[in-house]
Amino acid sequence: MSQGKLMPVEEALASLLAMADARQLDQSQELALDEARQRVLACDLVATLDLPPWPNSAMDGYALDLAHWDGQPLLVAQTVFAGRPGTPLQPGTCARIFTGAPVPAGADCVEMQENVELLDDGRVRFTQALKPGQNIRPQGQENRAGQVLLEAGTRLGPFELAVAAAQGCTRLPVVRKPRVALLSTGDELLEPGMALREGCIYNSNRTLLRHWLDALGCEVIDAGILPDQPQQTRLRLEQLQHGADLILTTGGVSAGDADCLGQVLRDSGRPLFWKLAIKPGKPLTVGYFGQVPVIGLPGNPASALVTFGLLARAYLLRIQGVGEVEPLGVMVPVAFDWARAGSRREYLRARLEQGQAVLYPNQSSGVLLGACWADGLVEIPEGRTLQAGDLARFIPFSELF
Amino acid sequence: MSQGKLMPVEEALASLLAMADARQLDQSQELALDEARQRVLACDLVATLDLPPWPNSAMDGYALDLAHWDGQPLLVAQTVFAGRPGTPLQPGTCARIFTGAPVPAGADCVEMQENVELLDDGRVRFTQALKPGQNIRPQGQENRAGQVLLEAGTRLGPFELAVAAAQGCTRLPVVRKPRVALLSTGDELLEPGMALREGCIYNSNRTLLRHWLDALGCEVIDAGILPDQPQQTRLRLEQLQHGADLILTTGGVSAGDADCLGQVLRDSGRPLFWKLAIKPGKPLTVGYFGQVPVIGLPGNPASALVTFGLLARAYLLRIQGVGEVEPLGVMVPVAFDWARAGSRREYLRARLEQGQAVLYPNQSSGVLLGACWADGLVEIPEGRTLQAGDLARFIPFSELF
């Protein structure tokens, strides 16, 4: 059986994103801010307010009209607290003012309280040089009404939701959740809680992906474990194709006789079999069953993790309209030598120690524990060797959620 | 009013963690794996199984007894599928075997199917040199029964939960949620949805912190907005002190006359006023009201964000038993000059572009929008200047959730 040419990771990602661009979810719903975290904004959030809505004091101090000031001590004619607007400044007076309080009309300068002298007659003397506008946060410093604050396609985290709250928003339009039918294939799989049988293992990919999908704003249709049986696989996919935006499977995607997902896609669907130039993760299957996209991840846990994190994740964010779906990564020095240039791009589970990437000792695709030990993935391009101290791209796991 | 000495960030963090160590939450609860994400493991997770539980094939191929092999073609006497154990190998035979299938007793080597020749008489000829153990994943390769897989204090994400599932676990003991009473102070604050009044602004910190606290596994007791009024502040803190593990406030912590939280803590509690050597965020208040710890964050959104992310977050993780509570960060070159050495450590909202940290143009502590634009914080130590290309620590926001 021929190995065939391996598809570079970028090419696979570009194809997946092209598929996703053609299948963007066009329904949205309005959610209360408290419910909208981890969802994707469906329309631009346009500011309805200048922020701050009025000039306010950045300090506890005294507000004066510097442009018309003669340099003499000023009478403190009012006190302006946050939330309680003062009255226009009268000539020859200043205002006691607190942080966040609106600067009264006529004032163009705030001096901090540490720099004034309180006179016995109730006036204040300014002891330092003053500049127009000092210690005043001008209206609209953060944004102007009409400005786009967050673009459609923005993932909503605490910061973005706070920006909406600052505009007085209580609800936001978000893209509906992608519905992902999740199924595992393999006669060797048992669900946790069942008694272990000889030759079997517990299904960990279901747990991995349920939680990850949830973090990416997806609704999981849990379709369980499928036996390695083409007829049943076909039947299950037929049931799932109506409700799902994506069928996501693990296992059953290598070329072996017992791998029937690929067989079913060959027979009944439109397969785009990809052997990826990626390690771990080579046997990824992408295709359609009827009209529904199918991503078949390898069954080995580290392979499922890497291919989900680098490829399926991008697909699921993109159908929600997210523009930037690739992790940034950073260049870090590696603490190891990498002597054998590979034909596949490798993603190694690694931890940062004193800023250097240190490898988990067992990089087998069957080993999941390394991902808990590690902080992220070190990327080693095809054909590259490395010496300790060389730079490589590091993708923190935290960027993949 | 004297500025007093500023406390270095490390010292503040060390004090907070010492407070947290003395107040670790000692109650736990058992949750189903599906409910346990973002919670903290209460006890070590000890493996009950070797993983894999039996030697299995890493390839589709043929299993043979290399130690007793005479180099001749072997009869294929059985086929071993994943999940369906075979029978012990008989002399002169080999087994057809698929990926993940248990290696039959007596076999010590698997040759991949691409490297064998199928003879007309049903035997297979091995055409390449063979090594003992090749393509076999030994029992216990990932872990041995009895081994600690995850330590108490581990935050549970998709990877950790999958490791538990792989052991057949269905439930995990997690530390109970910290109960955080969240309140905002300031007469200028309005909740989103209310009509804007002159001199007022919408409360965005409540939204910021609700979601962030949720992501850190906390239960939020939403205590609303408190007017700048010492008597009411005292009353509200008295009500809150019984149910809460932490009282978290925003605003009302600078030294101004209108800042009454500090005043109440001075009068009724045990304040540890800290002026931190941090920018934004100097006026952080930490203390106790009765027996309950209070962290008073500054009211400016960027200040609240930085002090919560770097200090309060660490406290809340530590009382749940998490050991490593500080973000790792990475050293990156900066794309800007930093000419004025400050007396406070600065945390600047920045984005990585071509691996370099680029600053958001407006670093005012009142501006929240920069945190949405940015990928994280660039840390500039006290007394440092930088030139473009110099390295500085970058803390991705994704590490702070």
Image: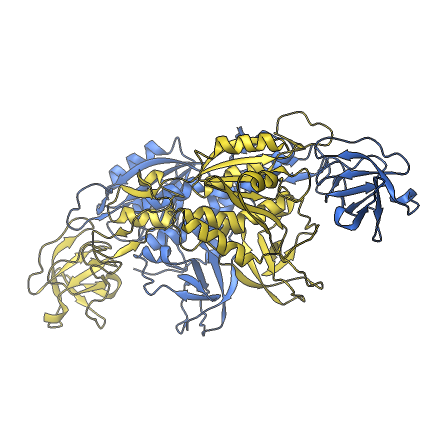
Chain colours: A yellow, B blue
Q: Is residue B114 left or right of residue B94?
A: left
Please state, as top left, top right, bottom left or bottom right, where the N terminus of chain B lies in the image.
bottom left
**Outermost residue, top direction?**
A195
Q: Where, by quadrant of the figure, is residue B287 drawn?
A: top left
Q: Is residue A63 above or below residue A186?
A: below
Q: Is residue A75 left or right of residue B280?
A: left
Q: Position of residue B207 (x, y in %)?
A: 33, 43
Q: Is residue A260 left or right of residue B368?
A: right
Total count of labels: 0
Query: Looking at the image, which is closer to me, A104 or A304?
Result: A304
Give the residue at x 30% y 53%. Answer: B255
Query: Looking at the image, which is closer to me, B293 or A282?
Result: A282
Residue A395 seen in the figure: yes
Q: Position of residue B397 (x, y in %)?
A: 44, 53
Give the residue at x 73% y 38%. Answer: B144
Q: Where, by quadrant of the figure, is residue B245 drawn?
A: top left
Q: Position of residue A299 (x, y in %)?
A: 62, 41
Give the residue at x 34% y 58%. Answer: B370
Query: Looking at the image, which is closer to me, A312 or B43?
Result: A312
**Outermost residue, front direction?**
B120
Q: Where, by quadrant of the figure, is residue A96 drawn?
A: bottom left
Residue B65 seen in the figure: no
Q: Position of residue B160 (x, y in %)?
A: 58, 40
